[in-house]
Image (cartoon, rainbow, N blue to C red):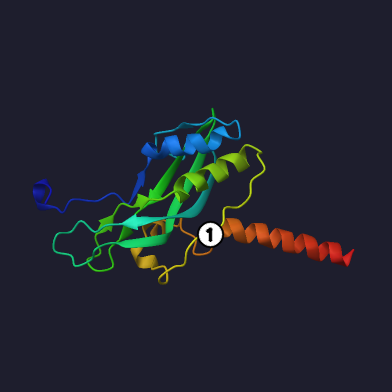
């Protein structure tokens, strides 16, 4: 326990500056260069997007029976700032067994998703990354800090809006 007999508060999200080199290497092929903005703030943000990435969580509670879990729906808020700067807030999830917070170990989808939006905001033509894998169960909003903060989308809104816009365009072309 923390001083004063209170339980230690665990962070509900984190920033992953250590993954900036992966983001940079993917941006280089488009001639883009961004720096990581280490201040976790909306102040000065010129673009932002809530999305989802994938990774694995481990429960660090010694008395918990869970060995951890993977998630294909980890909430992330990607932000762009002036001066070619960005950051991304990754929301944590709670263990289904003991309800304690866990910080994810992220896969390549973090860098791919961040780069997708930085390129799009920079006017670079992008192709939506393919979704890989299948979920082993429904997304539990009660365990997701992104849902609680209003930054998690159950559907992949990026993909849905692009498909919807193409559908509307093709429908209006057929009517003309």
Q: Position of residue 6 (x, y in %)?
A: 14, 52
Label 1 SS: loop
x, y percent for residue 14: 35, 45
Where is residue 128 drawn, in percent x and y? 60, 52
143 relative to 103, above or below? below
Q: Quadrant of the C terminus?
A: bottom right
Left or right: residue 2 versus residue 152 is left
Q: Is residue 121 left or right of residue 1?
A: right
* Residue sitting farthest toward the right: 176
Q: Residue furthest top?
A: 83
Work out whether residue 79 or residue 117 is closer to the camera in this orientation and state it. 117
Q: Position of residue 97 (x, y in %)?
A: 24, 69
The residue under the point 43% across, 36% down is 20
Which quadrant of the view contains residue 57? bottom left
Residue name at image x 45 percent, y 57 percent = 150
Question: Residue extending furthest bottom?
Answer: 137
Who's the residue at 60% across and 40% down the image? 119
Q: Which residue is mark 1?
A: 131
**Which residue is nearer to you in this view: 121 or 21?**
21
How would you rate the neighbour count of disc 1 (Cα within 10 Å): few for under 14, some for 14-19, many for 20 or more? few
Q: Is residue 170 above or below residue 77?
A: below
Q: Is residue 124 left or right of residue 89?
A: right
Residue 98, above or below 40: below
* Left-right relation of 62 to 91: left
State how many labels appear.
1
Say which residue appears at 60% left-offset and 58% top-offset.
159
């Amino acid at each position: 326990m923390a001083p004063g007999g209170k339980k230690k508060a665990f962070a509900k999200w984190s920033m992953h500056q250590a993954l900036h080199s992966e983001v940079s290497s993917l941006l280089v092929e488009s001639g883009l260069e961004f720096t990581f903005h280490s201040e976790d703030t909306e102040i000065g943000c010129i673009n932002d997007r809530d999305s989802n990435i994938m990774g694995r969580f481990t429960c660090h509670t010694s008395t918990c029976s869970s060995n951890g879990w993977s998630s294909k729906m980890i909430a992330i808020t990607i932000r762009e700032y002036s001066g070619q700067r960005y950051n991304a807030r990754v929301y944590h999830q709670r263990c289904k067994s003991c309800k304690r917070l866990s910080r994810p170990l992220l896969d390549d989808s973090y860098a791919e998703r961040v780069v997708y939006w930085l390129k799009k905001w920079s006017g670079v033509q992008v192709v939506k990354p393919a979704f890989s894998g299948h979920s082993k169960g429904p997304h539990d909003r009660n365990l997701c800090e992104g849902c609680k903060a209003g930054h998690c989308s159950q559907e992949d809104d990026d993909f849905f809006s692009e498909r919807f816009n193409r559908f509307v365009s093709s429908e209006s072309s057929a009517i003309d």
